[in-house]
Image (tube, rainbow, N blue to C red):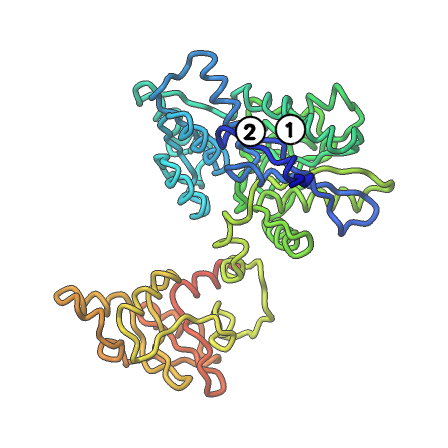
């Protein structure tokens, strides 16, 4: 039987590392004047553009005799570099210790652990020079660990070399040697440095545009050549509070500051419009590319990156509740206690149990949704509240109680509040360790917990 063209083009590789690079380029469909192309780096086996530098930096350390079989690699990472390093280290037989800031998504942490990496979580609210700053901590761990090597992506020349030698030539050929602008972010600085070096040789007129999270100092530095004071941001993987040693920003002609809300909403729109499930930094890049294209007076061919996959952020920016809790999805304000309820019952967003359900059902539901308590619903009304302490008291002397019905252990002494109840009254209720059951026009509206009040107060900042 004659082979089809697809079968003839199929290839077999020896290891998963052979799949790194040669990622596809997608032309976006929803822009007008400019042509926007997305380099789909989420197609790398580790799910991000950082697979390229992970392979490059470990290979360079091998060539230079800095590591040997059984050595321990140590790195500070906001996520994707760690995933790439853990993947390569596992394939090559190295131990891996990763120091990560505590804002990293749980999906990334689970992925890293599954690859066999040892994870050290540290604070994300401290600056360089603090002993718990993730880079300083990683460097110290490397010094104190026998037969170890600190990768140091921020100063490792093999980082930009990976993009100069692979990413940039791929883009140049895929774009048929016509590239007017490239939109990049900076985490370590390797991508923008490596690409700008390559394009300075083959296409000096190609512009480099920086996409930077609000709170990072990099965009301000490009505009003023002065370092401002860093703030905080939720986008992962890009933005810095210093200029990384390998970051060459000399060829950046324009910089855009993109807030978290715009980044997340753009990434969500990218999924709806283009079918691309992209990560949070990709939302920042796409938002900056859109701004650049809207400001351009002439048609241009623009490239940016889907730096990693959005499946690492399903519990965060693709979760409507997480977005609402952080004030990124807004509903019309009621001006009363309804504004505190993040999960209204009438929207089907409240996880609950029935009186006849077992404690095991309630416990598993609490763990699934990360709740400390559940309303017990019967006939559309709240019959009781069950919390973790109720279950613990029931089962700590008799584990068979897990199979008994919720009605035997739920709390029936309920505190009911109305929309007109004052915030001060609600605070007193919560200070007593109770939960408010909000009823509106005779119907259960939702629970009000301490977390709801905290989120409400934070949104008022």
Pinpoint residue 445: horizontal percent, then vertical percent: 46, 78
Q: Residue at 76% across / 52% down in the picture?
A: 30
Disc sitting over residue 251 in the figure: none
> For the point 73% across and 28% down, which residue is it?
172
| Front one among 245 and 96 | 96
Front-lying residue, 437 or 82: 82
Figure quadrant of residue 436: bottom left
- Are there few (<14), some (14-19), or many (20+) residues within 10 Å of tag 1? many
Q: Which residue is mark 2?
A: 52
How many numbered marks does the figure carry?
A: 2
115 vs 408: above or below: above
The local crowd at label 2, few if under 14, some if 14 to 19, many if 20 or more residues have their Cα within 10 Å, is many
In which quadrant is the N terminus drawn?
A: top right
Is residue 395 visible from the viewing direction of this image? yes
Disc ID at residue 167: 1
Residue 52 sits above or below residue 341 on the image: above
Looking at the image, which is closer to me, 140 or 192? 192
| Element carrying mark 1 | helix
Pointers 1 and 2 in contact (C-beta within 8 Å):
yes
Left-right relation of 31 to 1:
right
Residue positioned most to the front: 1
**Residue placed at 34% from the left, 35% from the top?**
118
Q: Is residue 207 left or right of residue 87?
A: right
Q: Secondary structure at mark 2?
A: helix
Find residue 370 and report its horizontal and vertical position in percent. 37, 60
Report the Cα–Cα distance between label 1 and label 2: 8 Å
Q: Earlier in the sequence, mark 1 or mark 2?
A: 2
């Amino acid at each position: 039987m004659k082979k089809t063209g697809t079968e003839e083009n199929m290839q077999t590789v020896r290891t998963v590392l052979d799949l790194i690079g040669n990622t596809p380029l997608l032309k976006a469909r929803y822009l007008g004047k400019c042509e926007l192309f997305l380099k789909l780096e989420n197609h790398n086996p580790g799910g991000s553009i950082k697979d390229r530098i992970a392979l490059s930096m470990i290979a360079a350390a091998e060539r230079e005799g800095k590591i040997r079989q059984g050595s321990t690699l140590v790195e500070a990472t906001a996520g994707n570099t760690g995933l790439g390093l853990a993947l390569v280290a596992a394939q090559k037989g190295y131990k891996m210790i990763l120091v990560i800031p505590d804002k990293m998504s749980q999906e990334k942490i689970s992925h890293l652990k599954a690859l066999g990496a040892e994870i050290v979580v540290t604070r994300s609210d401290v600056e360089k020079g603090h002993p718990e700053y993730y880079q300083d901590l990683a460097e110290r761990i490397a010094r104190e660990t026998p037969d170890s090597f600190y990768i140091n992506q921020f100063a490792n020349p093999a980082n930009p070399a990976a993009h100069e030698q692979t990413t940039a030539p791929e883009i140049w050929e895929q774009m048929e040697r016509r590239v007017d602008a490239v939109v990049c972010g900076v985490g370590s600085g390797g991508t923008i440095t490596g690409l700008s070096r390559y394009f300075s040789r083959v296409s000096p007129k190609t512009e480099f545009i920086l996409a930077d999270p609000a709170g990072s100092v990099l965009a301000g530095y490009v505009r003023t050549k002065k370092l401002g004071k860093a703030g905080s941001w939720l986008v992962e993987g890009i933005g810095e509070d210093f200029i990384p040693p390998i970051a060459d920003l000399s060829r950046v002609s324009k910089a855009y500051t993109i807030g978290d809300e715009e980044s997340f909403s753009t990434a969500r729109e990218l999924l709806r419009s283009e079918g691309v499930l992209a990560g949070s930094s990709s939302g920042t890049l796409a938002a900056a590319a859109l701004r650049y294209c809207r400001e351009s007076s002439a048609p241009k061919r623009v490239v940016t990156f889907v730096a990693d996959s959005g499946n690492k952020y399903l519990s965060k920016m693709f979760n409507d509740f997480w977005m609402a809790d952080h004030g990124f999805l807004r509903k019309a304000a009621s001006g009363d206690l309804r504004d505190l309820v993040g999960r209204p019952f009438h929207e089907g967003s409240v996880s609950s149990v029935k009186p006849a359900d077992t404690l095991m059902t309630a416990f598993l539901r609490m763990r699934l949704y990360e709740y400390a308590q559940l309303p017990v619903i019967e006939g559309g009304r709240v019959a009781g509240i069950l919390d973790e302490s109720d279950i613990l008291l029931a089962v700590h002397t008799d584990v068979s109680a897990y199979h008994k019905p919720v009605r035997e252990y739920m709390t029936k002494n309920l505190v009911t509040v109305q929309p007109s109840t004052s915030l001060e009254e609600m605070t007193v209720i919560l200070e007593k360790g109770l939960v408010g059951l909000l009823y509106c026009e005779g119907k259960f509206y939702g629970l009000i917990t301490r977390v709801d009040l905290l989120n409400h107060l934070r949104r008022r900042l």
